[in-house]
Each structure stands twice: as C-alpha cells, then as structure tokens.
Image: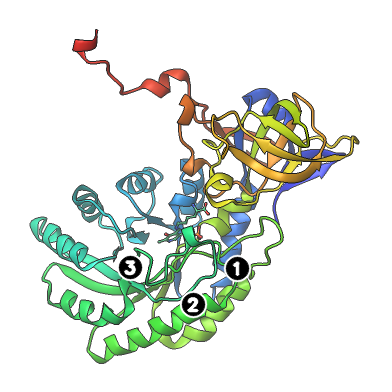
Amino acid sequence: MNDFNYRDDRLWCEDVPVEVIAGKVGTPFYLYSHKTLLQHFRVFDEALRDVPHIICYAAKANSNLAILRLFVKEGGGVDIVSGGELYRALQVGADPGKIVYSGVGKRVDEIDFALRSEILMFNVESSEELGVINERAGLMGRKARISLRINPDVDPKTHPHISTGLKSNKFGIDIEKSLEEYRRARTLPHVEIVGVDCHIGSQVTQISPFIDALERLKSLIGRLREEGIEIRYLDLGGGLGITYNEEMPPHPEEYARAVIESARDLKVTFIFEPGRVIVGNAGILVSRVLYTKSNGEKNFVIVDAGMNDLIRPSIYGSYHQVQPVVIRDRGSFLADVVGPICESGDFLAKGRMIPKLERGELIAVMSAGAYGFSMASNYNSRPRIAEVLVKDRKFHVVRKREEYADLTRGERVPAFLK
Ligand code: LLP
C-alpha cells in the first residue's frame, strides 16, 4: 500500500500531482508521502500490540530530520550506527531511553557521545569493543547498558552484500562464544547487561530465517538466566523485505505473529529496528529525461538522476520500477535508463520494457524511500538533490537541493599553491 497513484494518467502523491512539484522544485528530487510513512509505522507498531515493544527505526534507511521526527512523534525510538545518526536523533527530540546503538566500528568519541546522551543500550559487536565501552564508562563515572549482538549463523537468503547473520560476515559475536562473553561482561564494573541483540540481514522475504535466529537466541537467554544473568530486552533487528518487483515478503502482521508465537513467554521487552519496510515504498525518485538515443539494437533513456543519487541498482543490481509521471499512448520499447555519470555502472534500470519516453518528460523511480538519499554522494561533483514531503494537498521541501557552494565547503587551497 502506498499513496503514489495515477489519476487520469497522471501520477499523484497523496493529493498533489507529481508534475506540479517537479515544476516548482526542479529535478531530480526524492518525494515522500507522509500518509504512507505514517501508515507503515503504525501497521508495524499495531502488529506488535500484544507484547511490550519499542520500534527503533533504523535511521540509516532514511535519516532526513522530518522523517525521523515523524516516527519520534509516533513514540518510536531510533537505531543508530554512528555519532552522526545520534546527533540527528537528538535534534528531533528522540527519547535517548529509546535509542540503541549498533555497528562493528564504534569510535571512542562516538561511544562517549552515546554515554553522555544516556542511550538505552549499546549493541556490542566484539570483545574488544566491550572492553573499550567499559573503560570509557568508567572514566565518565557511568554505567553503560549493553547487549551483545549475536551472530546466530543463519542464512537470511538475501543479497550477499546485505546478509549479516552468517558466521562469515563481520557482524556480531559468534553465538558459540557468546555465553563466555556474557560471563566476562558480568565481571566488568562499568557495564550493565540488559539485553540480547541480533540482526540477520536486510530485504529478507521469508519468515523462517527470523524464527531460526530467534530460536537460537531463546536458548541463549535460557542459559544466561540459569546463570543469573537477567535479560530485559530482546532486540531482533530489522530486515523485513518489501516488494520492489515480484517479491512477496510477509506482511508485518504475519511476521509479528510468528515472532510472538515463538517468544511470547520470554518476559522481555522486544526491540525491532525496521528501516526499509517503513520507508522503502513511501518514497520515489523523480527525474527528467535529458536525451534518448539508440545505439543499433539498444535504446538508452538518459535522465538527470544518476548513481550518485540512487546507487542501489549499480551496486546490488537492485530492481526499481520505472514509471512515466504522465502516461501517454506511444507504446513501449526495451531500454536502459541511465544517468549522466561517467561510468557504465551508472544505470537506474537495465533492459527494461518501458513506455517510450521523450526528452523533457518525467519518470518516477519507485520504492526509493529506503537507502536512496541516505546513500547519495557528490560523485562527479553533483550537488545532492532535494527531498520533498507531501502531506495531503501540500508539499514541503524537507531538504533543499545543494548548491555549487555546498560542494566546496570546507575545502582549502594551501598557501603554497596560491
Ligand atoms: N539494524 C541493523 C543493525 C542494520 O544493520 C540494519 C540494516 C537495519 C537494522 C535495518 O534493516 P532494514 O529493516 O532496513 O532491512 N543499503 C542496503 C541495505 C543495507 C542494510 C544495512 N543494515 C540496500 O540498499 O539494500
């Protein structure tokens, strides 16, 4: 379900025609629907009504302040992976008591920032990190609440670059060694064990890997409790997939039911870290056709958005539907939709049957709300594009398009070159 729909052959976002926004804001831009964002958050939250839980939205999926604020207003927490994401979360008034901090490479200054902010817990990913957190907390005269991120060694059956719960991945602490690590944590004076955490991967479209991981964590929690180590939080990470093309991921209700069935009696507060499932289909990328050309057999539609704006197709071969913003009756052709960047890997769609497009027309790249803007770069010295949020009949620019001056901010030519 989302609020990008055609009315009389024109694409609308809620009650605003997309072409009107393009006319005012220029292209390319990301466009988000407030109604869809809210609904996706609420559906997930509602699905978990029968168990105590906190939804810590994974800021990395889309960290625009307006979007973070929306979920914070709904009572959500935030899953962060850097000092920058903590800064953003605090800027929108997130409750530090609902912030969890994951990531294999937390720097000392980031750990200090999180300790000062009194976040809910660190999801610790290595033995060394545990030592550093203990030391920093000691220096600050505080106690760090921690859980260990367990690598349960299950195959999430997703793209290898976004699978994280296999032994061969860099994430978490080997489940076999985790008991030992918890025992060590208990002896550290400046940490307080509060939970168990895992995140097996992203764009997971089956329930079974989540439940496999959960079963393993349950037996770990059992063992810990036998040894008198109390566990209050069970963080199951994010990872629930969405439909980009023909995937049929489980509905959040179905996912929640399976989790609750398997772990209802655990007496913990559940934490979830969904990203994509909340924001993915709540956003699109709008771009304008610059040129079309045909090289013998192959048709190219060259648009003004490139891999620096949306990198998913280039690095994961991801599929995003490409649709015309205004449907015209000109038939279809097989084409590559490519950007202006000087790399052959710069494409948004490859070998796709799409409506014949002409110079000046607008396209919508669908399902671009997650890992779209948040992975954008300035490659080829392209200013990062605008982000727009629609609510009902109004649109709001929630991040203005960068200007050329933004590109060189902070750069200096040293005196010896002058
Ligand atoms: N929690 C942790 C610890 C994570 O590492 C991630 C995603 C999430 C939660 C949120 O996962 P989600 O619910 O969004 O699947 N750039 C890739 C996705 C990388 C995901 C990284 N971790 C993409 O564009 O598909």
Of the two numbered discs 1 and 3 on the same chain, state the one appearing first in sequence: 3
> How many numbered badges does the structure rendering display?
3
> Residue 281: x, y in percent?
63, 52
Q: Which residue is mark 2?
A: 51
Answer left or right for 366 relative to 309.
right
Q: Is residue 7 visible?
A: yes
Q: Furthest-top residue in view?
A: 418
Q: Amino acid at mark 3?
A: Gly
Q: Which residue occupies 47% across, 48% down?
A: 68
Q: Which residue is mark 3?
A: 172
Q: Which residue is mark 1?
A: 205
Depth order, front residue of 350/279: 350
Number of other residues with Cα within 10 Å of mark 2, as a class: few under 14, some 14 to 19, many 20 or more = some
Q: Amino acid at mark 1?
A: Thr
Q: Which mark is residue 20?
A: none
Answer left or right for 182 relative to 323.
left
**In the displayed structure, would residue 234 be above or below residue 352?**
below
Q: Amino acid at mark 2?
A: Val
> Mark 3 to mark 2: distance in Å?
26 Å
Assign a secondary structure to mark 2.
Answer: loop
> Residue 16: x, y in percent?
73, 36
Q: Which residue occupies 33% across, 49% down?
A: 86
Q: Which residue occupies 45% across, 56% down?
A: 58
Q: Furthest-bottom residue in view?
A: 226
